Amino acid sequence: MTLTKQKNQLPVFKKMSTQPWSLLAPLLIVLLGLFLYPIIEVIRYSFTNLRFGRIEYAYTLHSFKSVFTDRNFLDMVRITFTFVIFSVTFQLINGFIVAFAIYIGEKLKLKGSVFVRTSVIISMAIPGIIIGVIWRMMLDESPTGILNYYLSLFGFGPVRFLTDPKIALISVIIANIWRGTANNMILLYAGLKTIPESILEAADVDGAGSFRKVFSIIIPSISPVLMICGLLSIIGTFNTFDMIMSLTGGGPAGATEVLALSSYKEIFVNYSLGKGSAIAAIILLINIIMAMIYFNMNKKVEV
């Protein structure tokens, strides 16, 4: 009897296996409910003057107008792009240096290559909020601040890492460089492993030095990976919120307030759901543009 039931059920499962939509349906429902629907609501709220605690609202462009006429908006844009440009540049540089060091270490069969690779990857496993807390402990100006404590042993400090507007932005950038180096290292290391040994051996035969091989052979060979790696870093850094929130909270005096953090503050501090959603919609538009660039670059790399 059991065998008969199983035989009768087999055609049903076989039919389901030929219909991928039936298998993807649960995932699509989750994506629609937890991802797409909130995005649609954010866009809808951005065209309203809705505030928390007020039921009545009207559809208007006032929220976008208040964003673009805000005297602090241009400063936030400048801070955001400064944060992104310097973070991504040094994430790529540091990621390449670490990846290249591991790559050379493995070729020379040096001990510790796996340890270095694992140590760098640890930063990827730490949540952004915790990274902000760790760096706040390091950069704090009080006697408990780790870096200022060691500077005081040499007669320096205390340095206002988190309370001086100019130094605070540099501190946040350095923390984000540390955070993003690991991801770049993994991608660039994978790119380095794809370089044919015959090309490097031919360069050795021609008498090319180490400097020449790096800039004339290795970097051009992994340039597609570098471009994709850079664009992914831009997208990730542009949306950084958690680390800055726990490290500086956007201070001092808005010196480290990026667009993502500004959207959060407008909604949950100023209770302006319309204006906060308008900033989020602007961020979403920029992300869509960067995602389109990424997919276009990815297609070119695959070709």
Image (cartoon, rainbow, N blue to C red):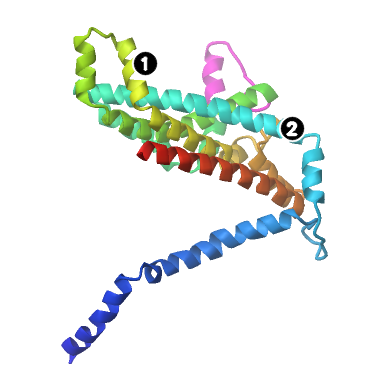
Residue 193 to residue 287: above or below: above
Query: In the image, what residue occupies the spot 81% across and 34% down?
Result: 71
Q: Earlier in the sequence, mark 1 or mark 2?
A: 2
Please state the horizontal and vertical placement of residue 97, each as a whole percent of the image. Answer: 38, 22
Looking at the rendered image, the disc whose residue lies closer to the viewer, 1 or 2, is 1
Residue identified by numbered label 1: 215
The magenta segment: 141-163
Please state the horizontal and vertical placement of residue 262, each as a whole percent of the image. Answer: 69, 42
- Whether residues under marks 1 and 2 lie with C-beta atoms below 8 angstroms apart, the answer is no
**Residue kind at label 1, given as amino acid type:** Phe
**Residue kind at label 2, given as amino acid type:** Leu
Residue 13 to residue 243: above or below: below
Residue identified by numbered label 2: 74
Which image quadrant is residue 183 in?
top left
- Based on the picture, tell me whether residue 148 belongs to the magenta stretch: yes
- Based on the picture, tell me whether residue 187 belongs to the magenta stretch: no
